[in-house]
Image (cartoon, helix red, strand yellow):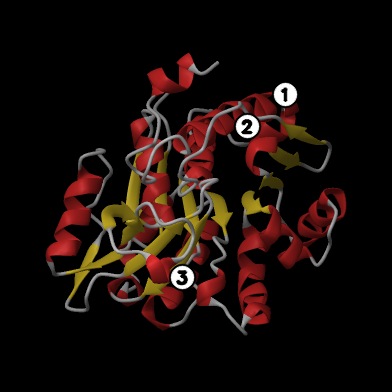
Amino acid sequence: MLSKKIFCIGELLIDFVAENQGADLSKATVFTKKAGGAPANVACAISKLGGNSAFIGCVGEDPFGSFLMNRIDAFDVDLSLVQRSSTFTTLAFVSLAENGERDFVFSRGADRELQYDSSIKSSFRDQMVHLGAATALLGGPLEKAYSHYLFDAITENAFISFDPNYRADLWKGNEKTFVKKCMPYIEKSHLCKFSLEEAQMLSKKNSLPEASEALHQIGAEIITITLGSEGTWVSTKNSRQTIPSIAVTPVDTTGAGDAFIGCLLQQISQLPSHEMLSESESTLMEMVEVANRAGAITTTGYGAIDSLPDINQLNSSE
């Protein structure tokens, strides 16, 4: 059986990663240009592991936009649905602390100009749609298109995955708005991937069991909460447990969550039916264990897309 196609919707941008400066962007003098954007990272992770992915987003008609298109195309991601805009390509400036944790400053541009394309709807039929929301809920054409694509995915019986991709720099003083805007996506998704901070913010609960219960009540069927080196908390209607990760020495955590969810979605796309996940808890937990390895391996190199593992690296980490 052919694997399902996974449509990843959201931003594609340039990450300018500050080198050798700890965590203070104000002191950075040297930056390295990397392709980034959470949904694009996910699409690349899926494709690099042998899956079938497409990216839906918008980049500028400028050299940075061309760089991004060429970089993502090298992973055999379907880029036929990407739009180009006269608005400059979105940029993100990223600082890295000694433990690999990062801080972002965004200069938004073309990603918000994505226009809804109604002709895509039929392509979603019985496939998979991943919605990464780092910039998608900030208004403008992108947010409108994003909402339309959620509705299209529902009506076309697609498996829906949602990652809120909370960025504090983008939502300062507007956290309540962010929470409110995430609710319809949590309600309608089969799978939600959260960081611990996101799960606590969106559920208004501190403990993992309470947060999971609250998010299930909103509507999410499968909940994964990534916990860094501790692994991933997985919650379904019938089971809750932490799946451990592998030990690595991280240098850059950018894209670890994207590698995790990309690997998990790639595995789900191989199933004859996603209903099998609820029928077999062990299948889901085994998939999360593999996805944890993908996320961990990604932290051992610089740049999210450059550090994504292929199937050989994933298998050798067992």
Task: Give 280 or 138, whichever is nearer the viewer.
Answer: 138
Task: Give 34 or 177, whichever is nearer the viewer.
Answer: 34
Q: Which residue is mark 1?
A: 282
Tell me the quarter of the image containing the C terminus: top right
Cα distance, mark 2 to mark 3? 26 Å
Q: Could you say whether the residue bearing mark 3 is in a helix, strand or loop? A: loop
Mark 1: give few (<14), some (14-19) or many (20+) Cα within 10 Å.
few
> Of the residues under marks 2 and 1, which one precedes in the sequence?
1
Residue at figure coordinates x 38%, y 57% from the top left: 37
> Residue 29, how many percent across, how many down?
30, 64
Marks 3 and 1: which is nearer the front?
3
Q: Could you say whether the residue bearing mark 2 is in a helix, strand or loop? A: helix
> Residue 245, how many percent across, how many down?
64, 30
Cα distance, mark 2 to mark 1? 10 Å
Residue 126: tell me if it is visible: no
Marks 2 and 1: which is nearer the front?
2
Tell me the quarter of the image containing the N terminus: top left
Q: Which residue is mark 2?
A: 288
* Above or below 218: residue 239: above
Q: Which residue is mark 3?
A: 136
Q: Amino acid at mark 3?
A: Ala
Q: Is residue 110 left or right of residue 259?
A: left
Occupied quadrant, residue 286? top right
Q: Is residue 182 left or right of residue 265?
A: right
* Above or below 144: residue 268: above
Q: Amino acid at mark 1?
A: Ser
* Above or below 52: residue 282: above
Q: Could you say whether the residue bearing mark 1 is in a helix, strand or loop? A: helix
Marks 2,3: beta carbons within 8 A: no
> Residue 86, how many percent across, how many down?
17, 78
> Of the residues under marks 2 and 3, which one precedes in the sequence?
3
